[in-house]
Image (cartoon, grey):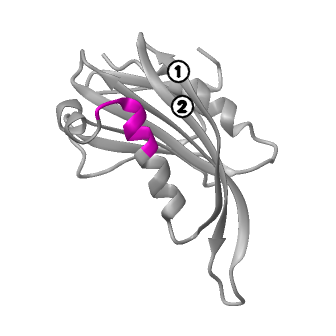
Amino acid sequence: MDKDFESFSIYGFSVDYPKDSRVEFNPKGRRGEGDVVFHLPDRTKFFLSWGDLERASKSFKTVEEQAESSLKRIGKAGNVKSFERVSHDSITIHSHNGAYNQAKFEEVRVGLFGGKKHPREAHSVHLYCQESGRYYVMYAMFPRGGAYDYEGAFRKMAKSLRCH
């Protein structure tokens, strides 16, 4: 494991995360469904959610359909402008095929003197695990550019997911 990452494990799954992160659980989360947020020191957040695969499969026939639906929701958000998918790839995580998406957009934060646009990227991984009976979604929205390698850290987290 990378010296800058530590292992997080709960409910039979695990993921490696940047060790300078603060970990926050959703208090409503439970074994079958929940989420956890990894807060980086600069206030950027990486999210990991899980839920019942059977229930998700009723709404989405494939992991790609679920990923597409998530992207559409981001693009339709009121504070998002100029939304554009940059890439859509397959990713293999712990023997499962998942969907990896990257998009760029302008986030408009309404302020006292009008809205200011902030260039952002969204990265997401959607994964279905028959063995655990769960789906997993990892996603992050972070500033474009800068000194920190957000994409590299996110990809390391995604590839380290052990879902069963």
User: Where is mark 1, residue-wise?
Assistant: 91
Q: Give 116 or 16, whichever is nearer the viewer.
A: 116
Residue stretch in magenta: 61-68
SS label for mark 2? strand
Amino acid at pointer 1: Ile
Check whether the beta carbons of the residues at disc 1 and disc 2 lie within 8 A of each other: yes
* Figure quadrant of residue 105: bottom right
User: In the image as oriented, which residue stretches furthest toward the top?
Assistant: 95
Residue 61 image offset from top left, x and y in percent: 28, 32
Callout 1: few (<14), some (14-19), or many (20+) C-alpha neighbours within 10 Å? some
Q: Residue at x 45, y 43 (%)?
A: 68
**Vertical relation: 149 (above or below) 72:** above
Q: Secondary structure at mark 1?
A: strand
Q: Position of residue 121 (x, y in %)?
A: 66, 49
Quarter containing the C terminus: top left
| Main secondary structure type of the part rendered in magenta | helix
Q: Position of residue 140 (x, y in %)?
A: 55, 45
Tell me the quadrant of the picture where the N terminus can be found.
top right
Magenta stretch: includes residue 7: no
The foreground one among 46 and 102 is: 102
Locate residue 13: give its quadrant.
top left
- Which residue is depicted at the point 50% across and 56% down? 74
Magenta segment: does it hold 65? yes
Give the crowd class for mark 2: few <14, some 14-19, many >=20 residues within 10 Å: many
| Near-viewer residue (38 or 70) | 70
Q: Which mark is residue 100?
A: 2
The three-letter code of the residue at mark 2 reads: Tyr
Q: Residue at position x 39%, y 27% from top?
A: 127
Task: Say whether disc 1 or disc 2 marks the residue closer to the N-terminus.
Answer: 1
Residue 70 location (% of width, % of height): 43, 48
Q: Compared to 3, does 153 lie above or below? A: below
